[in-house]
Image: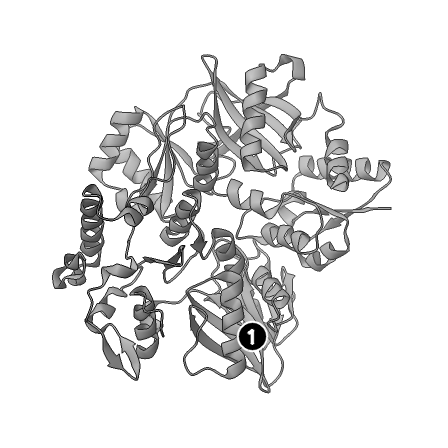
Amino acid sequence: MSRLGIFVDRKTLSSAEQLNALIHCRDVAEGMGHNADFIFPVDIQKIAKMDALFIRARTDPMNVTYVAAKMAEFHGIPVIDDPRSIQVCGDKINMYSRLMKKGISLPETVFLSKKDLTVERVMELFDSLGSPLILKEPSTSFSTRVERVRDVSEFFRVARRFIKLSDWIVVQQYIESRYDWRVGVLDGKLLYACKYTIPSVTFKIQASVNGHIVYCGVESVRPGDIPPHVIQTGIDASNAIGHGLYGVDIKNNNGDAYVIEVNDNPSLESGEDQYYPDLYGKIVTHLFAK
Amino acid sequence: MASGIWDTAAQSNPAGARERASHLMNRRLQTDENPVLADFLTPVQAAPACGAIALPAERAIVLSESIPAGTFQKKNGVRSTGKREQALTRDAQFIIRRNGEYHVIAESYFYKTEPYYTILSLEYEGKQVKPASSAVLDAYVTPICLERAKAGGVPVCEWGISQAYVPLPAILYGLSYYATNADYAVVKDQVAAKDRIRHITNNGKYPFCFQKFPEGAEVLECTAIFGKTCNADGSIASHASILYEIFGLPLVKMVFVNDAGSYSLSSLSPLRYSQLTEQERAILCAHISAQESL
């Protein structure tokens, strides 16, 4: 009987939705004849005793999830997310560089270093990319450090805040849309797809508005209802990163699909899998097939 | 040789020096005098179909041939670059090319810093770079650093991860983006441990890494420059060499626990040029100027 380790942390378990999703994952694994154990950071040495590891905590190359992924790699244990995917997806400079290299369609994107942060350069960016612009701190997740700026002073106000966290930041052309496609891909194959409907009070999938957090709506979409070029773009983008599990955010604007980002460790707890009941089964099968 | 790159005015203004160096390098490129540099300064990648991509162009570029010949002198028996050492200013970054590999020299290679992105850019250009971006991450995340060092044959401290409890005495390291290995602490009582843990975990938000610290042991910090140490114990010198093979960090502070003459690696961390001894500065400068016969 194979042992699946599900790496979690306190934050993961603090959400009822996440907890339900994790228990569902464990039940699926056990239903397939495997043992499934939750592994907490303090138990990280137990990873060596597992046959596969599924990380379900917020990943970052500088936090304990990266240690977990590397521990699995050291012991030759199949892992989602693998360290390379965490390194690439955790840093938007790295991720966009990878996507650019593979010719994936993106909004026009510029990397701006601390030293390039001058009025002249910012004016050039508005001239070339239009207004508004989107600024991203490279390790943002859940849209926390993504801002829309409309003029030079606003650009500097946001950029100076981001530059404290990273020597390079991302400047992107703004593409308007009411929703993002989220295409879930596992090992280069479509796993699920859904729409994240952007709240009318903001331009991103999650935002703090007047002190309240507003979340996007999640609508699972059947495979036949997804535009084929959106699926293909999602698969191409995930293949540019690796062969693990990814959630690709795509804006479909006037028939053109633009990749907004590729997420490792994509959310699976908000109804993304409504029309994909075998989602966890495929993940478990994939892990043990390696 | 573009001697103007290292003139006195440039030294008094490092940022200006970098700009001037970059300008002169580019001017030389325009005359096609130097195909190696032309290759080096090629943009990271072509723009994708969707639009123009621009990468930050500024880099502190100091290739081996940039230091004027005949400016060396002896210091403590080590050939030094004399006035040229003033270039080792805070945050200065150097790229040297040796045997087809690019070496990025900086005080810190911390995630999302200029040196980290310089390495990443070179990797995307298809260049062989030391240190690699993945090695940099591994080196600065203590548990991974220790596991890789152990696999390479370096004795390491026994480590664990905790949210609150720690067996005492212990060395504590933060384990999050907001922590740096340079900020470690040896704690020997519960009060000190509790205070320190609160600090490095951001009030319990993140886990931390602890290492058992034997009674009577002491911490030893040692600098390694391209895997070499100055006046270090023989076993530490050997460990430095192995650690350089593993991580490729040109400049690193090694922290060891000395337990009755037995040294175990505790961590690798960045260090400031200002922390270098005169002898270490001279060696680093000699490397920057590509003096391979050290």
For residue B87, which quarter of the picture?
A: bottom left
Residue at point 57%, 32% (across, down): A238
* Residue, disc 1: B187
For residue B160, which quarter of the picture?
A: bottom right
Q: Where is residue B229 drawn, in percent x and y? A: 43, 76
Quarter of the figure that contains the C terminus of chain A: top right
Q: Chain of mark 1?
A: B
For residue B141, which quarter of the picture?
A: bottom right
Q: How many numbered marks, from 0 up?
A: 1
In depth, the one of A170 and A256 nearer the eye is A256
Q: Is residue A147 left or right of residue A231?
A: left
Q: Where is residue A115 drawn, in percent x and y? A: 27, 47
Residue at point 22%, 68% (across, down): B84
For mark 1, give the secondary structure. Answer: strand
Residue at point 43%, 40% (across, down): A93
Q: Residues within 10 Å of mark 1 (few under 14, many from 20)?
A: many
In depth, the one of B19 and B203 nearer the eye is B19
Residue A144 visible at all: no
Q: Is residue B191 above or below residue A11?
A: below
Residue B81 visible at all: yes
Q: Where is residue B197 drawn, in percent x and y? A: 55, 64
In depth, the one of A32 and B177 nearer the eye is A32
Q: Is residue A149 above or below residue B128?
A: above
Identify which amino acid the numbered label 1 is placed on. Answer: Val
